[in-house]
Image (cartoon, rainbow, N blue to C red):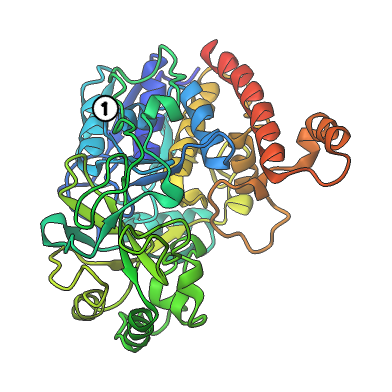
Amino acid sequence: MLPQKIRVIGAGLAGCEAAHFLANKGVAVELYEMRPRTQTEAHQTADFAELVCSNSFKSLSPATAPGIMKREMEMLGSLSLACAREAAIGAGEALGVDRDRFSAAMTKAIRNHPLITVKEEEVHSLPDEDGMITILATGPLTSPALSESLRKRTGSDHFYFYDAISPIVDASSLDRSIIFAANRYGKQTRSLDQMFPSAQTGEAAAAEPALATEAAPAADAPAGEVAPGADYLNCPMNKEEYDLFMKELLRGERVEAKSFERVKHFEGCMPIEEMADRGHETLRFGPMKPVGLDDPRTGRYPYAAVQLRPENESKTAYNLVGFQTKLKYGEQARIFKLIPGLAEVEFLRMGSMHRNTFVDSPRVLNLDLSLKSARHILLAGQITGVEGYMESASIGILAGIFALARLQQRPIPDPPASSALGALLGHVRNTRNPDFQPSGINFGLFEDSNFTEALEALRARFKKKIPKDERRKAMGEVCLKAAEEYAARVRAF
């Protein structure tokens, strides 16, 4: 029998989830984190699970794949979601968090756990077999030395893509006489518990769930005032303003990758200037789409619009939604100040770009996420080829479950194929795809064969084409039922 202790390297979302799950099961955990002694090109604090990109955890709707997956994660006692409840801020139908409060809550929960020992030191190479299971959860910004050690272990080069970050601006520098507050289609902010009822088990984090901004009666606010119940600020553009912005955006100087690297961007985090390269109207049907955003001054939506999402509960800072960029800093200031309402804006953080690393998981990992070349090492998080905060956290939970099963000499407790977690794990294991690329959770990962009974019932009901919303709702119900049974199995460990 292996000793009841597990080593986790990396205190990001995945590492914290794995460590927390195992510690709650009575397993002692050694958690290694190189920050703050050694920082990465994107991190800025010493806190665990720092959110370096967006502060959104995507949709809460039970009719979306991200919403389904969050419910499944909470059934398994997700620490990330417990802390997200504590740090939640209004973000429409999405789960937005105050990034500083969130990371502080994660750090507190981990450091205060009696079975987790935090070691603030850099791990330069993968440990040899020493009788202790290791979970590698160092994320896409794995240090060069550890990345090289992993390359040698797998016998193949890592894959990579470039990730871009949106700018953050000071709320006090915004021109509220131009900018208006509104959620798309006038949707009012609801409390977090209304959108996402708690499904926490007794093994969840100790933090009490906190509500997001309460809903307010629908009402248009005069220009320059924040509408009650609205989370987003909107910068409207007419055609002339949009044309000028596009002209300057395409002319802007960009940070170039190293000459020997081919620049590859993750589609879900494409720099705004790269999207602009695809055509003059691309942004109007993407991050700058105006539909559903009625300007109270005109009574209709503008030609284009830039949305600003709050960074914290007090709304003293906002990020430019969808404005990931690799423009040089000076160019960002020049070009983004052309956006109506941002002429005098103060940037708290400029947009930037960094290189993300991941492995060819279907070919280098076993079914339990362990390396084929070193079975005592399991991988977790974004380095496995999933994309997104909650996706990384969910693979961290699964790595913790698989490591516990290894300790207890149990078979691999796979999540059901008819669950969002099962679908995401299926992507990581998909050997049929010769060109493995990162993916977030989406309905394209779900196999219809796992939902046969539910889909046949819908076909009988609708005769012709099944409405998309009905289809997704039915699939979600199947997922959650399967996930409940899986969570019960895991709790029995």
Q: Residue 430, percent across and down?
A: 67, 50
Q: Which residue is label 1 attached to?
A: 110
Q: Residue 492, percent across and down?
A: 55, 10
Q: Left or right? Give the position of 19 relative to 319.
A: right
Q: Residue 322, percent across and down?
A: 38, 62
Label 1 crowd bin: few (<14), some (14–19), many (20+), radius 10 Å: many
Q: Left or right? Give the position of 458 relative to 67.
A: right
Q: Residue 206, percent across and down?
A: 29, 17
Image: 130 above or below 54: above
**x 21%, y 28%: residue:** 108
**x 55%, y 47%: residue:** 373
Q: Secondary structure at mark 1?
A: helix
Amino acid at pointer 1: Ile
Q: Left or right? Give the position of 396 relative to 435.
A: left
Q: Nearer the viewer, residue 99 or 160?
A: 99
Q: Is residue 380 visible?
A: no
**x 35%, y 43%: residue:** 91
Image: 470 above or below 147: above
Q: Nearer the viewer, residue 241 or 194?
A: 241
Total numbered badges shown on the rendered structure: 1
Image: 279 above or below 109: below
Q: Quadrant of residue 177?
A: bottom left
Q: Quadrant of residue 334?
A: bottom left
Q: Left or right? Give the position of 262 relative to 63.
A: left
Q: Nearer the viewer, residue 486 or 170?
A: 170
Q: Nearer the viewer, residue 223 or 201?
A: 223
Image: 355 above or below 97: below
Q: Is residue 468 visible?
A: yes
